[in-house]
Amino acid sequence: MPTAEPAAGAAASAPTADGRTRDRVLQLLLAHGAATAAQLGAELGLSPAAIRRHLDALLADGDVVAREQSVRGHRGRGRPAKVFVLTDAARLRCGRHTYDGMATAALRWIARTGGAEAVDSFAAEQVADLEARCRTAMEDAGDDPLARAEALATVLTAEGYAANASTIASGGQLCQHHCPVAHVAAEFPQLCEAETAVISRLIGSHVQRLATIAHGDGVCTTHIPAQPGGPHTTANPVRTDR
């Protein structure tokens, strides 16, 4: 006699039920800071095997990590129990953060107490480490500004800027599809100006910022004028973010 197939509705709801349970595990870890599998299972009314299955999935997804439980005073025989804690990525998803607001408030304080020059100095210092890392990665890029722009786009993509470089009729352009400080730079354009200066130094050419995410554009676009005496080129995008 053939085995009956499970109902379509039940099969479809299983992943949803698992997802809800794992969300509850994450919320418990957010509330308690750390917990053992036994503690989580007891709070959720799950068997040891069931809670272990959910924790294994969360470990595989990078949402939790396991650590040895610290025990104060005398410790009995056997290995200490494992405790589970949220990773930084999971913690970001579980709660609202105000990093942008704090950064903006800090820059306002710098502007009030130190003036515009202090903000300029702060912005330049913030991009100094990025410039050093990019310069090291671009050592073999040669002297041609467009070739250096392509190399810079590759480095910026690795830094999280989702960048690409293109060759166009009037020279070239560097596009950044993500800006980690867009909300702060909307009020303090010195951050964009410092980054533009870094791009100019790294490429070895005068550049012009045409658009920025901080000011409502979809992409940060930097134009690299064609070099005097250089070959006239036609539009031919060279993507470096793949």
Image (tube, rainbow, N blue to C red):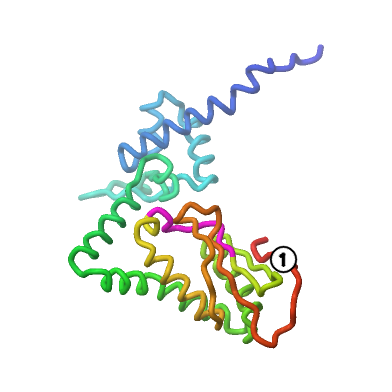
Query: Can the viewer see residue 82?
Result: no
Q: Which residue is mark 1?
A: 237
Image position of 179 (left or right of 150): left
At which x and y percent is residue 184? Answer: 37, 56
- 83 and 234: which one is in front? 234
Image position of 234 (left or right of 57): right
Q: Is residue 48 magenta?
A: no
- 220 and 155: which one is in front? 220
At which x and y percent is residue 54? Answer: 50, 35
Question: What is the tally of numbered marks visible in this picture?
Answer: 1
Query: Can the viewer see residue 48?
Result: yes
Q: Is residue 48 above or below residue 106?
A: above
Neighbor class of circle 1 (other Cα within 10 Å; few <14, some 14-19, many 20+) is: few
**Callout 1 secondary element:** strand
Q: Is residue 63 above or below residue 167?
A: above
Residue stretch in magenta: 175-183
Image quadrant containing the C terminus: bottom right
Image position of 169 (left or right of 65): right
Specify the farthest residue to the top.
Answer: 1
The residue depicted at 21 percent of the width and 61 percent of the height is 109
At which x and y percent is residue 8? Answer: 69, 18
Image position of 233 (left or right of 23): right
The residue depicted at 50 percent of the width and 45 percent of the height is 59
Image quadrant containing the N terminus: top right
Q: Is residue 177 magenta?
A: yes
The residue depicted at 58 percent of the width and 84 percent of the height is 139
Q: Is residue 235 above or below residue 57?
A: below
Q: Quadrant of residue 142?
A: bottom right
What type is the residue that disc 1 sits on? Answer: Pro
